[in-house]
Image (cartoon, helix red, strand yellow):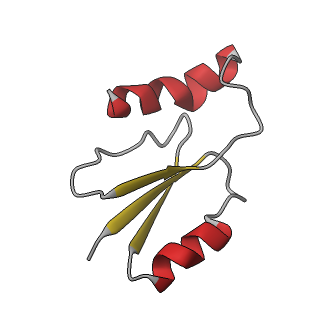
């Protein structure tokens, strides 16, 4: 089964309609909360990466410390 990894930045975020569309097509959804306590896991075995938005700007130093730097390490 093909895997879609979803990175979210807030507890209230969810993949919504696009997640439903992937699931309807047989994809397995893996949803991860990315923040200071939860860095992203490696992407081995992941076919599609879906990154949800954030209420923070990527230029905000707090956002960079909270999650962006960790995401960039995994993305390379």
Q: Which of the 4 image quarters holds residue 15?
A: bottom right
Identify the residue at image location x=36%, y=33%. Answer: 75
Q: In this view, does 60 lie above or below 3?
A: above
How many marks are shown on the rendered structure? 0
Identify the residue at image location x=42%, y=27%. Answer: 72
Image spot of residue 18 (x, y percent): 60, 68
Image spot of residue 7 (x, y percent): 51, 50
Q: In this view, does 9 lie above or below 36?
A: below
**Residue 53 vs residue 68: left or right?**
right
Query: In the depicted view, which residue is nearer to us: 39 or 21?
Result: 21
Image spot of residue 58 (x, y percent): 65, 24
Q: Which of the 4 image quarters holds residue 64?
A: top right
Instruction: Tell me the quadrant of the picture where the C terminus can be found.
Output: top left
Q: Which of the 4 image quarters holds residue 17?
A: bottom right
Identify the residue at image location x=73%, y=26%. Answer: 57
**Residue 50 vs residue 17: left or right?**
left
Q: In this view, does 4 lie above or below 50?
A: below
Identify the residue at image location x=77%, y=38%. Answer: 55
Image spot of residue 35 (x, y percent): 56, 39
């Amino acid at each position: 089964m093909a895997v879609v990894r979803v990175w979210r930045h807030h507890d209230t975020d969810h993949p919504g309609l696009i997640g439903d569309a992937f699931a309807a097509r047989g994809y397995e959804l893996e949803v991860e909360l990315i923040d200071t306590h939860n860095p992203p896991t490696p992407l081995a075995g992941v076919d599609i990466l879906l990154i949800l938005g954030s209420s923070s700007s990527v230029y905000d130093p707090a956002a960079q410390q909270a999650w962006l730097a960790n995401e960039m390490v995994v993305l390379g």
